[in-house]
């Protein structure tokens, strides 16, 4: 079997057994990047050859010595470019941090290193993780490997495209309002946003501190579960990191949907959701019911307030978090400026892109005197009400099922002209961040254009184990799925979609 | 008759806490050090760095709050204060606005008109900024982040003070409380205590507060005194000439002995405060507060009372000895070791304070070992050293904490009480002064004194006077 075709766990197993060397594994992916990335632009930086060679030798030796015993030892990994890597450029896809080399590793990166994984490069993203298409990157757009005329989604578009294109077996992304789940859906890969605080944010360049969370992107659920277990855990360097012990993930080979209850917010498959997305979700529901799950519809009345609450909180925090980029200590500085204030103004005006500036302005406005209570405080109250509604639902359901996005990947160049429309496309993902819930996005079909559709498993706080098990159980009975291919193995696929929709809506809603 | 004005003053006092490490990272808080040597990604605002609260800071704030009769906010939180300046690496300061840790306290201060209560509005925890260094040669500014992230407590009083004397009394009381608690050394010159003065004037009898100004950059009690006098006069002059007082922040210039406008209320910044999302709210249990309260030291008034009772010292002495906790501790230790509190007190009131004054030092800077001073006192009691030499030895103890007996031995400062040695000198003196011996036997009392003097002179003052008398009497 080709190295590129293996899952990360399979690759690690072969490395452990000596069937594949660490060098072979890394070189196979580097070759893929060299050959394909000109087309996709998933990477901003690829690891320096010399450093990579040293690391390969060190890991190979470490595996032999028993220093690296994790089930992903020897596996190459791509890291989103807003996660600090010591000695390797970390740009947040911004001119502001072009050429910035961190002096320390993010805790998540340290954990990868300690597990014997090899960081092969840094992936493209929306500038400072602000965007849903990876088009706001200062270093060029990333293209969707399924169809290069389309966006990969965002902001972790580079990480998801890299995995979809076979340029990396797995990747780290970050998710503030859907930034792992939405691009995973657009690129036909699997991504997990863990419970807020599960993975240390130390070294993750903050967009919105109370919402940001690092998570895994992989070819399938099992790979994500393995990577999640490596990066999760309390970190005393992050005060918002959870002290709660990370639950061990059950043996996923035994995963089953039998007896599980699933709730679907009917607002999530209503108006505004593309019919093809709707039917793919409902088809997935039928498959899950066949596998023994009980599915019900319920109503989320607060749904209309999710986007405004999210953008107020996220932009408020962002406006403050991005103040440190001022041209004084590191990053871009306008050298012609006369005096301090002009230097601040010009450096920030030239260093930041349009979308970042828009969010800084929005955030500064909602925090300014006289508006703080009307916007920010109200948004926090709204957030609490949204959480209460979800809490009610979790009393009844093991997990909540939802599309990851209302449509499949849009064409390049069609989203940024209407930012409000772009913000609204985050409708199914942002509530999860506001409430801190874990959620996983995985492929459940393709549309008539041949673009993948993703389904989200949303769990209650700390319930990563539960959603990973349910997602794995679904994955077993779902169609085979890999980039560019979608072969049917389930007879539900042959049923006319419209019929399913009709039955579901009349019967349950 | 000219109008009579009253000055209304409130203070914002910043106290730098004496923690070993900074408020949000593990860097040292030590004063000095090479530029940017006490820094890390957190206190230099590197991308991705996160703050972790130093629990000691909360502990100190609670201790100070309890010592000043404040209510502790048991669910408190940090907020971000956003403003751009290069000494502030994140361009926001982590401070407290909405839920400060202490509120509604008060302390009593002694003034020339008796005891006065000054109310404390609130106290909050925050981080200090770095320092800008202007390089005139290169015509650029550089930043030193060694002070960035050093913990501060800001103590905001109510506008309860009326005179500069009351202000100084309040500051001295705060300083004493902080020093007793060990939460800060409160040195104005080094900036570990800083006071901003809010001042307004109003006609005596008026209930309404006048428009106030805030004065910054006051680095000494002298500057505070002068700034208050100057600002009072400036405001009265404006009112008398029918002009308006503008609410503004003024900067005191020590060289010019005057204050100048920094910014008016119209340019007041909008700090866009909001809860710091990188830190969890702080939950302070009753138990924690009780534990801290139980460990509070004996404060000055109780200590002074005890010294009077236990040691029988005067009001004046106890008051002076207890002004500084470090000095009081040293005094007590010395008293215990030498077994003579009164003599120990005399030494502190005399030699110790005089030496401090001569060297322009603060009691906080005393470093000699109480056991060494106790040894000097004992040696005097035992007649091993005279007053003059004892002072010489103490001077060395003060500077380099020498072991007194060894030093006395080495430098020949011991009293000679060896009978043989004294007899030898007495014999010499008697042989040289036959006439005086005759006078003595003729009943001239002065003659004996003269002979003792001669012996002492020959012995360079080191003869034990009692022994000399005894030997001389015997021989005569």
Image (tube, coloured by chain):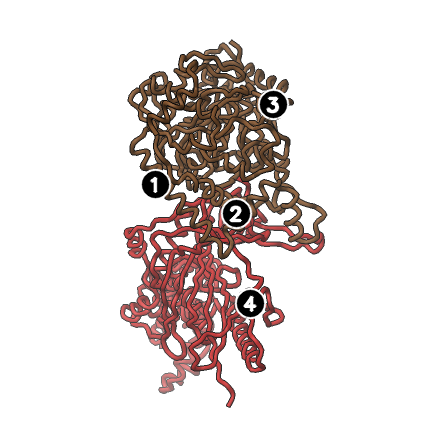
User: Along the line of sight, which residue is nearer the eye, A246 or B389?
Assistant: A246
Q: CA distance from mark 1 to mark 4?
A: 46 Å
Q: CA distance from mark 4 to mark 3?
A: 60 Å
B43 displayed left or right of A475: right
Foreground mark, 4 or 3, reads 3
Q: Is residue A46 at all visible to an observer of this figure?
A: no
Residue B458: mark: none
**Is there CB contact under 8 Å for labels 3 and 1?**
no
Secondary element at image label 4: strand
Task: Report x, y in % for residue B427.
Answer: 41, 72
Mark 3 / mark 1, whichever is N-terminal: 3
Which residue is identified by label 2? A363
- Host chain of mark 1: A
Instruction: Give the chain coloured red.
Output: B
Which residue is identified by label 1? A388
Which residue is identified by label 4? B248
Q: CA distance from mark 2 to mark 1?
A: 25 Å
Which residue is identified by label 3? A148
């Amino acid at each position: 079997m080709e190295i590129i075709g293996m899952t990360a766990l399979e690759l690690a197993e072969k490395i452990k057994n000596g069937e594949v060397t660490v060098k072979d594994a890394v070189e196979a992916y580097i070759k893929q990047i060299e050959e394909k990335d000109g087309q996709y632009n998933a990477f901003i930086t690829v690891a320096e050859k010399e450093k990579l060679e040293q690391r390969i030798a060190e890991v190979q030796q470490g595996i032999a010595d028993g220093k690296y015993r994790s089930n992903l030892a020897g596996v190459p990994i791509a890291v989103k470019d807003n996660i600090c890597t010591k000695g390797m450029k970390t740009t947040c896809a911004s001119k502001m941090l072009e050429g910035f080399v961190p002096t320390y590793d993010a805790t998540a990166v340290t954990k990868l290193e300690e597990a014997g994984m090899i960081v092969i490069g840094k992936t493209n993203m929306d500038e400072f993780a602000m965007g849903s298409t990876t088009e706001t990157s200062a270093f060029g757009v990333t293209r969707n490997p399924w169809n290069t005329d389309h966006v990969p989604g965002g902001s972790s578009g580079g990480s998801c495209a890299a995995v979809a294109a076979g340029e990396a077996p797995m990747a780290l992304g970050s998710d503030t309002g859907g930034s792992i789940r939405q691009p995973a859906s657009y690129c036909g890969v699997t991504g997990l946003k863990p419970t807020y605080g599960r993975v240390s944010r130390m070294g993750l360049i903050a967009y919105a501190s109370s919402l940001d969370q690092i998570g895994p992107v992989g070819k399938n659920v099992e790979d994500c579960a393995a990577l999640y277990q490596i990066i999760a855990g309390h970190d005393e360097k992050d005060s918002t990191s959870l002290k709660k012990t990370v639950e061990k993930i059950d043996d996923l080979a035994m995963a089953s949907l039998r007896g599980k209850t699933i709730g679907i917010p009917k607002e999530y498959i209503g108006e505004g959701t593309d019919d093809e997305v709707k039917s793919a979700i409902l088809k997935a529901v039928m498959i899950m019911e066949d596998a023994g799950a009980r599915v019900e519809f319920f109503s989320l009345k607060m749904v209309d307030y999710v986007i405004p609450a999210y953008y107020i909180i996220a932009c408020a925090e962002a406006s403050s978090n991005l103040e440190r980029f001022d041209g004084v200590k590191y990053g871009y500085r306008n050298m012609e400026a006369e005096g301090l204030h002009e230097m601040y103004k010009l450096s920030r005006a030239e260093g930041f892109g349009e979308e970042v500036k828009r969010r800084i302005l929005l955030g500064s406005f909602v925090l300014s005197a006289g508006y703080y209570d009307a916007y920010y405080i109200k948004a926090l109250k709204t957030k609490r009400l949204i959480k209460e509604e979800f809490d009610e639902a979790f009393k009844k359901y093991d997990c909540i099922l939802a599309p990851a996005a209302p449509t499949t990947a849009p064409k390049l160049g069609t989203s940024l002209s209407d930012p409000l429309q772009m913000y609204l496309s985050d409708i199914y993902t942002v509530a999860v961040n506001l409430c801190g819930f874990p959620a996983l996005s995985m492929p459940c079909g393709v549309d008539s254009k041949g673009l993948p559709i993703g389904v989200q498993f949303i769990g209650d706080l700390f319930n990563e184990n539960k959603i990973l098990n349910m997602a794995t159980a679904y994955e077993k009975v779902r169609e085979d799925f890999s980039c560019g291919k979608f072969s049917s193995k389930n007879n539900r696929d042959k049923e006319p979609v419209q019929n399913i929709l009709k039955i579901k809506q009349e019967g349950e809603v | 008759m000219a109008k009579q004005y009253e000055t209304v003053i409130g203070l914002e006092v910043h106290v730098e806490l004496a923690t070993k490490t900074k408020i949000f990272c593990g860097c040292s808080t030590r004063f000095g050090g090479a530029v940017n040597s006490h820094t890390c990604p957190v206190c230099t605002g590197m991308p991705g760095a996160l703050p972790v609260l130093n629990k000691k800071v909360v502990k100190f704030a609670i201790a100070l709050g309890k010592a000043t009769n404040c209510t502790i906010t048991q669910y408190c939180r940090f907020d971000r204060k956003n403003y751009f300046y290069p000494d502030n690496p994140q361009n926001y300061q982590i401070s407290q606005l909405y839920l400060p840790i202490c509120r509604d306290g008060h302390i009593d201060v002694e003034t020339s008109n008796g005891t006065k209560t000054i109310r404390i509005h609130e106290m909050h925890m925050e981080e200090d900024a770095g320092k800008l260094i202007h390089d005139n040669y290169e015509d650029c500014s550089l930043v030193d982040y060694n002070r960035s992230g050093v913990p501060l407590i800001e103590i905001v009083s109510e506008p309860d003070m009326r005179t500069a004397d009351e202000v100084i009394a309040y500051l001295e009381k705060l300083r004493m409380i902080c020093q007793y608690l060990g939460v800060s050394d409160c040195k104005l010159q080094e900036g570990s205590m800083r006071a901003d003065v809010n001042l307004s004037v109003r006609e005596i009898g008026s209930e309404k507060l006048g428009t106030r100004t805030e004065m910054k950059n006051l680095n000494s009690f002298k500057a505070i005194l002068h700034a208050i006098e100057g600002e009072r006069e400036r405001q009265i002059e404006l009112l008398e000439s029918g002009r308006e007082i503008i609410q503004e922040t003024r900067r005191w210039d020590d060289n010019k002995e005057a204050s100048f406008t920094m910014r008016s209320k119209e340019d007041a910044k909008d700090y866009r405060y909001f809860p710091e999302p990188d830190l969890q709210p702080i939950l302070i249990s009753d138990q924690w507060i009780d534990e801290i309260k139980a460990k509070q030291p004996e404060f000055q008034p109780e200590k002074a009372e005890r010294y009077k009772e236990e040691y029988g010292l005067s009001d004046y002495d106890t008051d002076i000895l207890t002004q500084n906790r470090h000095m009081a501790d040293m005094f007590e230790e010395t008293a215990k070791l030498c077994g003579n509190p009164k003599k120990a007190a005399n030494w502190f009131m005399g030699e110790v304070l005089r030496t401090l004054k001569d060297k322009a030092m603060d009691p906080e800077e005393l470093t000699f070992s109480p056991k060494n001073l106790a040894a000097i006192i004992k040696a005097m009691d035992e007649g091993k050293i005279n007053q003059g030499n004892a002072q010489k030895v103490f001077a060395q103890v003060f500077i380099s904490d020498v072991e007194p007996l060894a030093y006395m031995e080495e430098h020949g400062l011991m009293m000679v009480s060896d009978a043989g040695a004294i007899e030898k000198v007495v014999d010499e003196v008697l042989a040289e002064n036959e006439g005086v011996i005759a006078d003595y036997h003729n009943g001239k009392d002065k003659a004996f004194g003269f002979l003792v003097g001669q012996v002492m002179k020959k012995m360079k003052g080191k003869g034990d006077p009692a022994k000399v008398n005894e030997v001389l009497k015997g021989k005569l």
